Image (cartoon, grey):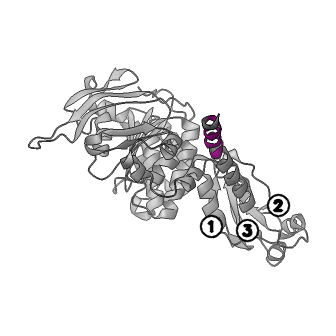
Amino acid sequence: MADNNNPGTTGGHGVEIHLEEVSKRYPGQQAPAVESVTMTIPAGETVVLVGPSGSGKTTTMRMINRLIEPTSGKISIAGEDVLALDPDKLRREIGYSIQQAGLFPHMTVGENVGMVPGLVGWSKQRIAERVEEMLDLVGLDPAEYTKRFPRQLSGGQQQRVGVARALAANPPVLLMDEPFGAVDPITRGVLQDELMRLQADLGKTIVFVTHDFDEAVKLGDRIAVLGERSKILQYDTPEAILTNPADDTVAGFVGAGAALKQLTLRRVRDIDVTEVPTAKVDEAPSALAERLGSRRGAIGLVLDRRNRPLRWATAREAGAVAALERAGRPVEDSVSLASTLQDALEAILTDDDGVAVVTGKRGEYAGVVDIDTVMNAIKALREENAEPDEAAVAGAGS
């Protein structure tokens, strides 16, 4: 399945997964844990399995890479029957990321990330290059993190390493079992954004398990809402489930505030971002002050040498320091082009100046977004959603 001769990160080579009448029965239990699941997961899409605890969503996902052996049914990946493959080889060709990262504590970050490429026979030089590439891809400086041990990392950093390890051998499929469930809400949002950014670049087939419907809406191209024994209650796009839940159980998952949840269906890349004056960290403070001019309330950004946002500063703040690295206040929250409008709104509301920094694929500065821009997008979204209802009323009256 995986093209291990091509370790590049931009191949976009996700493959289709098909489950046909897949069931799992455990000895001594009268009812099956998973019963007759049939679904197709399209190549290159993120499909989220969401359901209550005990619904069998993790069991269903783990049968794909045979961490749990199905009792009956058929699972195919790229047309190959996984039950006919060597299970160890199968698992090396499928990325796997779990809650709390699952890193080996006695191995360095570099050794963790390079583990699967080593198992499939890559050379030491190729592994070293891949480790560096993958750490950079998930936003960790290889020079700083390669030799560290997991205990020296924060929870969010460990999850980033876990994702890097899962992607290191360039698998076509990535299975993610509540990977962000053990981190704080702010870090969780950042990691979700990072995953969306990576997926936009890589085009893997991702199967993602969560019990959080908001996370499912944010991340999924499609969502499978599961009931008992992994019965599929609805399998559709997030927008279709939000606007037309199949039954009361699905409506319960959607919960209150469905209109607000629709903010997660629009990305920052879909709206116009604006610009503020910027200066590189090694420029003279006077350079930023000049670009800001004398306009009251004007604020600019200090960027690092890789064009990533570091600090907010006014002309007065820039003029009061000898170096821009100490000007103003740090950029504490940002959104990426792949972030949702809900993420952008939250970042704007928590910022002192009501502006959120927008970053690109490698964390580079891409612009800013303010409350007016987001509110205009919300207004357009409401008008868009109202149009079908108005058309239906007009049709009923004719």
Residue at point 26%, 39% (across, down)? 67
Residue at point 19%, 32% (across, down)? 71
Amino acid on which the number 2 mark rests in the picture: Pro
Q: How many marks?
A: 3
Magenta span includes 390? yes
**Residue bounds of the magenta highlight:** 386-395
Q: Residue furthest left?
A: 28
Q: Residue furthest top?
A: 79
Q: Secondary structure at mark 3?
A: strand
Provide the residue designation for mark 1: 332
Residue 277's disc is: 2
Q: Secondary structure at mark 1?
A: loop
Q: Residues within 10 Å of mark 3 (few under 14, many from 20)?
A: many
Residue at point 26%, 45% (across, down)? 228
Task: Mark 2 or mark 1: name the one nearer the start of the chain.
Answer: 2
Amino acid on which the number 3 mark rests in the picture: Trp
Marks 3 and 1, how far apart at CA: 10 Å
Q: Residue 8, image x and y in percent?
A: 55, 33
Amino acid on which the number 1 mark rests in the picture: Glu
The answer to whether the residue labelled 3 contacts the one labelled 1, judged by CB atoms less than 8 Å apart, is no
